[in-house]
Amino acid sequence: MLDITSLNNLLAHPKKIVITTHHKPDGDAMGSSLGLYNYLIQQGHHTTVITPTDYPDFLSWMPGNAEVIIYTEKTDQSAALIADADLIFCLDFNNLSRINEMGELVRTAKAYKIMIDHHLEPEDFDDYRHWDINACAAAQLVYSFIVDVLDNKKLINKDVATCLYTGIMTDSASFRLPNTTSAVHRVVADLIDAGAVNWRIHELVYNSASENRLRFLGHCLSNCLEVLPEFNTAIITVNKHDLEKYDVNTGDTEGIVNYALSIASIRLAAFIVERPDKVKLSLRSKGDFPANEICKLYFSGGGHRNAAGGVSSAPLQEVVNQLKLILPEYKKLLIQ
Ligand code: 5GP
Ligand code: MN
């Protein structure tokens, strides 16, 4: 284990550093990783962000993006960087299964491993942990890591601020989720003061969809939405033919589940999609309904109380039926 002093000593001289984050990175995964990247390069560290898989175009504009390495595209180079690193930062995940094949490479690497995360039940693979489940985003924790742990607020420049703002904005659903506390708004205010152009970041992330994406959304809402009033639950089910027909790319399904949750009475919303190799579930809930418990108990997944996910190897319709069969168990919580 490392303490704060040894960590500060390690970072006092240029090091070989890898930053990684969970597969199919979202806004917080990329924002927290590139925020930390833009901080570390100012101190002369040789720093590389390696993502386990690709990520959406609407996240491919952040400062430092051109330097990101995607493991599935550059496997050998990624493996060499991981093996050679002095420090590996693990951001926005806390279980090595969330980085696919890279997990074993990180586990066996000689580097010190530093976890910065806000998910429940961390796996014990790290040497230093900056972890808080009450944080609204890993990007919020990167901010407090730089400001409170490393005492280096002055290095939060425009690039760092832009990335961290993006992480907080996306993981808090644009500052709407219950964990968007006054403290989060103070961090965001600091980031704007440091140069993050808030309105421009919203444009880049939320107003950059393709026409196909919008037509796919229309299809989901018109043809794939099932409302179960007796359980205050709404399910959107998408099969693989729909994905092909609308040329759905990485990131195009992101956020669609929130439309199902936007119905007044709905407490639980599910987006269930037939990927080529598995069925993927995204659950969202309102209030104290534990979406993560369903994902953990039945779909080999997990996440936060109000936003969770999981997978299944069963056929699409079976997965939908399985979810429907689980609902009566939760009826009390759903109809209160
Ligand atoms: P999404 O629905 O956007 O894919 O995921 C929402 C949240 O659920 C993520 O931030 C992550 O915490 C969690 N999550 C999604 N898929 C999985 C999964 O397969 N396993 C685990 N443990 N968590 C997941
Ligand atoms: Mn996150």
Image (tube, grey):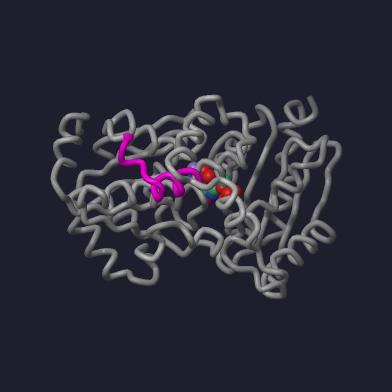
Q: Is residue 164 magenta?
A: yes
In the rendered view, does 292 fall on the left or right side of 47? right
Q: Is residue 161 visible?
A: yes
Residue 228 placement, left or right of 198: right
Residue 65, given in percent of the width and then of the height, sits at: 41, 61
Tell me what residue is drawn at x 79 percent, y 24 percent: 336
Q: Main secondary structure of the magenta part?
A: helix
Res 301 seen here: no
Q: Residue 174: which quarter of the image? A: top right
Residue at 49% across / 40% down in the picture? 192
| Image-quadrant location for residue 72 | bottom left
Which quadrant is the N terminus positioned in? top left
Instruction: Please state the horizontal and vertical placement of residue 162, each as a whole percent of the image.
Output: 46, 48
Q: Is residue 78 above or below residue 179?
A: below
Q: In front here: 286 or 189?
A: 189
In the figure, 184 relative to 158: above or below? Answer: above
Quick check: 318 above or below 116? below
Horizontal and vertical percent position of residue 289: 67, 31
Stretch in magenta: 153-165
- Quarter occupied by residue 268: top right
In the rendered image, residue 113 lying in the magenta stretch gets the answer no
**Position of 238 compared to 162: left or right?**
right
**Residue located at (72% from left, 61% from top):** 238
Give the x, y percent position of residue 85.
Answer: 20, 54
In the image, 209 versus 290, the foreground residue is: 209
